[in-house]
Amino acid sequence: MPTRSRSPLTALARAGRPLSGWANPPIIKGSTYLFDTVESWRATGQRRQTERVLSYGARGNETVFALEDAITELEAGYRTKLFPTGLAAIAMMLLAYLRSGDHLLVCDGIYGPVSRLCRTQLAGYGIDTTFFDPTDQDWSRYLRPETRMVYVESPGSLIYDMLDLPAMSKVCHERGILLAADNTWGASLNYSPLALGCDLSVVAATKYLGGHSDVVLGSVTASEACFNRLEAISVNLGQTVAAEDAYLVLRGMRTLALRLQRHAESALYMADWLSRQPAIRTVYHPALASDPNHALWLRDARGSNGLLTVEFAPSIPASAIERGIDALKMYGIGASWGGYESLVLPVDINRTRFATHGEKPGYLLRIHIGLEDRKELKSDFENLLRGLD
Ligand SMILES: *Cc1c(COP(=O)(O)O)cnc(C)c1O
């Protein structure tokens, strides 16, 4: 099992930095990389089969490698490949390991567009997907002889269901099945899928790693045993990222721990307050003691973040809630999360649930608590609740 050699706080400050000269890796722009001799050009062509070397712009450069190294260290993996978006990272990972005739088992609560990818693109390639309920203790009954991968998101999108990854990885590895996790919630810092037994960890760096709502990028970190296929698909399908984007993500990561700490403190403050409001039936936030995932969160995570989702009392009409949302001053209405700023977005649980058929919940609003003053965030939301009386 990979272990971290130095504190993640030190890694965030130091990883990927040049040994001397500039404090930060400069932004390198280049396609052609020149060699002194035919022999060294040929030798590099050989070496790049197994090693990460500078050879051509699309294969990466010093800026891109610096970000790969930083994420690899935080995720305690063997190596990392970067992709243009989080979704691209997930798609490439699935395509890297799955072949026609393979079966993929996926947990409900994954990032919505991935389910569409499975049901359309992968189905078209003859790869069959089954979804299971994250609260189903008997999930392994869905495994088949041709199951090649189990793909999960823990905590999951929208209501943050957590999975017992160490227990799942035991079952998977006994049968030679890969276990892959989306670690966007954990932001490579607060949760460690590889240390918990996964083979692959994907992160939408667009969210907390970038942290400033100004860049989209994704990463996949692999264990040594399965890295080769990830590298191969990246090369075969010409996947590459811009140095500016890698630079922005690495710059964001320098303050990741501090930002997450503030996001988490303020979100817990809001979650605690919201859970005592009559207009709110449920607050989903694993750091909240009343959350059904709290025990697993305490056991497996090292911290939380700014995300919470509230379910309004079902008696409240959606139109009244949406008038209140439109009148919010401190919260933007928009996709994504993980930036410095507060956001709200109405969410449809049925977009991420395929195996779960519970009671239809009331109006769900995902809230991302940003770095603003938490008392001001609370009083703005108080206006929304007051309008519902
Ligand atoms: C946003 C998100 C993604 C996709 O990232 P993009 O960079 O927007 O493509 C994947 N997984 C999770 C959990 C996300 O929240």
Image: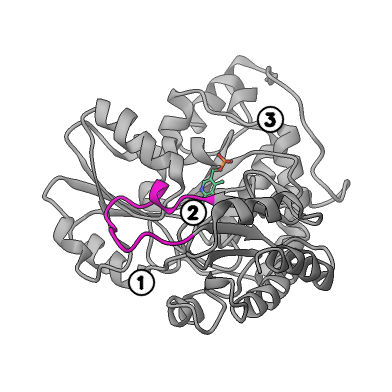
Name the kind of residue labelled 2 in the image.
Tyr
Q: Badge 3 is on which residue?
A: 242
Q: Is mark 3 within 8 Å of ligand 1?
A: no
Q: From where the camera sits, is residue 21 visible? A: yes
Q: Is residue 327 above or below residue 52?
A: below
* Image quadrant assignment for residue 90: top left
Question: Residue sitting at 52 percent across and 51 percent down?
Answer: 347
Residue designated by label 2? 78
Helix, strand or loop: magenta stretch: loop
Q: Position of residue 141 (x, y in %)?
A: 14, 61
Q: The N terminus lies in which quarter of the figure?
A: bottom left
Mark closer to the chain start, 1 or 3: 1
> Which residue appears at 45% of the width and 36% of the height?
231
Please state which of the two labelled residues, at mark 1 or mark 3, is closer to the viewer: 1
- Assess whether mark 2 and mark 3 are in contact (beta carbons under 8 angstroms): no
The verdict on label 1 being within 8 Å of ligand 1 is: no
User: From the viewer's perspective, is the residue at label 2 or at label 1 nearer?
Assistant: 1
Pointer 1 residue:
164
Q: Which region shows up in magenta?
A: 347-362
Is disc 2 surrounded by few (<14), some (14 to 19) or many (20+) residues within 10 Å? some
Residue 269 in the image: x percent, y percent? 70, 77
The amino acid type, in three-letter code, at marker 3 is Ala
Whole-percent x, y for residue 310 in the image: 56, 65
Measure how far apart labels 3 and 2 are at the Cα level: 22 Å
Where disc 2 sits, the SS reads: loop
Distance between mark 2 and mark 1 Cα atoms = 23 Å
Residue 211 spot, x, y in % from top left: 72, 52
The amino acid at mark 1 is Asp
Q: Secondary structure at mark 3?
A: loop
Marks counted in the figure total 3
